[in-house]
Image: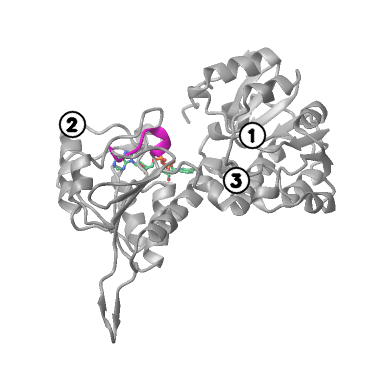
Amino acid sequence: MKIGTPRERVEGEKRVAMTPQSAIALKKLGYDCLIESGAGSAARFSDQAYRDAGVTVVADAAELWAQADVVAKIRPPGQTEVEMGHAGQVVISLLYPGQNTELLEALKTRGLTALAMDMVPRISRAQKMDVLSSMANIAGYRAVIEASNNFGRFFTGQITAAGKLPPAKVLVVGAGVAGLAAIGAAVSLGAITYAFDVRPEVAEQIESMGAEFVFLEFEQTQDSAATGGYAAPSSPEFQAKQLAKFRELAPDVDIVITTALIPGRPAPTLWTKDMVEAMKPGSVIVDLAAERGGNCELTVPDQAIETANGVKIIGYTDFPSRMATQASTLYSTNVRHMMDDLTPAKDGVPVVNMEDDVIRGATVTKDGVITFPPPPPKVQ
Ligand code: NAD
């Protein structure tokens, strides 16, 4: 059967879900590969590179959707794309089904079987398909690069014949995948790095990366084992302590990178207007939670703004796309692993086995039925 990747339609999206390298692996699973002409160009994969890897380059999206049995892409398909699909076709993409009810209805009505890469259960066996982690890792690193680009000073301290330069102080709020990547990048650039998370178990990881965990004097700690390793909303008392601590740190830190998220909820507001006002001119905030409303009260999604007191607030929501070649390489590898599990006989025929926990978790429509949300995981 044929697996194909169209050019992403969302403006500014530079990534592509199939690379020449992933196509070679997909061919070994028995698939013929198709790519829409120009789909990889923004990520620096030319049509010729695909041809050299044995991929058929098709002229446009309509031809690709007509020919492909499986369509692999990144951004959730828009209405025009869904309308190009046909019954029985398998679509593999980011879908965010919890927020995209209309899209689910459209996929179902069209008879498409859809697998959401963002719904792959985060269990050890499925780490190879975990696009949330592979993209968050890039976002965390890139957040520090954007911060340094907007910060007019060294990160590392220096003693030179011309004078002494203090090191920058970076605070990372939220130490999940993106936060830990940001800590790694900030420490490696030489900044004094602090980090905070509501999950106390990450303190060890933060410290092993060379940052300092910001402790709160508070009895209650979150038991994230009860919420699948994720954060839950904090109590008002805890929140008040946390904000008081941040208020204390605000005049002293130069760069704040916020990554705090709670599944299924808007991002918690953790860096308030008065904290921004207390920061030194030239300081930078990078809000990786911008797409979900932002952790900073003044963040404007997709924009970089400067406040009256000279603090830059970066609310970009396209960090992985800003490193499109490597983001495409990692995303397409995640997709290739998904295809591996979907092709047990390695014969180029996908089998959506709803008995498999990982495939079941990701499948949101199948045979004209919406299959989201999946049943809760079985208690071991
Ligand atoms: P996420 O993007 O949902 O959240 C980012 C971070 O924000 C989390 O560390 C969270 O604790 C933190 N946070 C939430 N509210 C906060 C607040 N008020 N103040 C400060 N921090 C706050 O998280 P993620 O990066 O997707 O990772 C979440 C968990 O999943 C981690 O334990 C991670 O190790 C785990 N994980 C497991 C696997 C796997 O087993 N396959 C893969 C990836 C991640």
Instruction: Give the magenta-colored segment's residue range.
Output: 290-297
Pick whichever of labels 3 and 2 is earlier in the sequence.
3
* SS state under label 3: helix
Residue pointed to by mark 3: 128
In the image, residue 79 sits, relative to residue 171, either above or below, namely: above
Quarter assignment of residue 159: bottom left
Q: Which residue is drawn at the image coordinates 28% and 84% (left, top)? A: 162
Most common secondary structure along the magenta stretch = loop
Q: Is residue 229 visible?
A: no
Check if mark 3's residue and mark 2's residue have beta carbons within 8 Å: no
Q: Does the residue labelled 1 lie within 8 Å of ligand 1?
A: no
Outermost residue to the front: 308
Question: In front: mark 1 or mark 2?
Answer: 1
In the image, residue 129 sits, relative to residue 265, either above or below, namely: below
Packing grade of label 2 (10 A; few <14, some 14-19, many >=20) is: few
Numbered tag placed on residue 9 in the rendering: 1
Instruction: Give coordinates of residue 307: x percent, y percent.
Output: 27, 46
Q: Which amino acid does label 1 sit on?
A: Arg
Q: How far apart are marks 1 and 2 (CA)?
A: 42 Å
Q: Which amino acid does label 2 sit on?
A: Pro
Numbered tag placed on residue 236 in the rendering: 2
Q: Which residue is drawn at the image coordinates 44% and 58% (left, top)? A: 145
Q: Which amino acid does label 3 sit on?
A: Lys
Q: Distance between the residues labelled 3 and 1?
A: 26 Å
